[in-house]
Amino acid sequence: MRVTFDSSKITYADLLDFFFDVHTPADPRWAGTQYRSAIFVYTPEQRQLAQQAVQSRGALGKMVAI
């Protein structure tokens, strides 16, 4: 699912907080190979914020710049 947002109403950092509030990559429902968590970034600033969000929560994953 692609999320489009208006940065004048919500920040990318707030979206990351919401993502981690509603989705826990370690949740057993997401275990295995069928489901994968992903954060896609479009700018260097988004990459930096996403990396910080992942690292601060101890989550593991890959980030892909498009």
Image (cartoon, grey):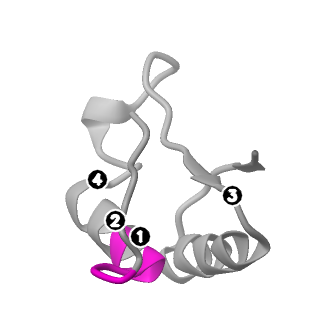
**Type of residue at label 1?**
Leu
**Type of residue at label 4?**
His
Q: Nearer the viewer, residue 60 or 48?
A: 48
Judging by the rendered image, the residue that carries numbered circle 2 is 20
Q: Are circles 4 and 1 on residues that touch, CB within 8 Å?
A: no
Q: Of helix, strand and loop, which one carries label 1?
A: helix
> In this picture, is 50 found above or below 28?
below
Q: Of helix, strand and loop, which one carries label 2?
A: helix
Checking the image for residue 42, the label placed there is 3
Q: Are circles 2 and 1 on residues that touch, CB within 8 Å?
A: yes
Q: Are circles 4 and 2 on residues that touch, CB within 8 Å?
A: yes
2 or 3: tag closer to the N-terminus: 2
Task: Give the CA distance from mark 1 to mark 3.
Answer: 14 Å
Judging by the rendered image, the residue that carries numbered circle 1 is 16
Quarter of the figure that contains the N terminus: top left
The reply, left or right, for residue 13 in relation to residue 19 is: right
The residue shown at (52%, 19%) is 33
Q: Position of residue 10 (x, y in %)?
A: 31, 79
Residue 14: in magenta span: yes
Other-residue count near label 3 (Cα within 10 Å), few / some / many at <14 / 14–19 / ≥20: few
Per the rendered image, the range of residues in magenta is 8-15
Residue 19 falls in which quadrant of the image? bottom left
Q: Position of residue 45 (x, y in %)?
A: 70, 79
Task: Give the CA distance from mark 4 to mark 1.
Answer: 10 Å
Mark 2 vs mark 3: give the one in front.
3
Checking the image for residue 35, the label placed there is none
Mark 2 vs mark 1: give the one in front.
1
The reply, left or right, for residue 63 in relation to residue 32 is: right
Residue 1: in magenta span: no
Judging by the rendered image, the residue that carries numbered circle 4 is 23
Quarter of the figure that contains the C terminus: top right
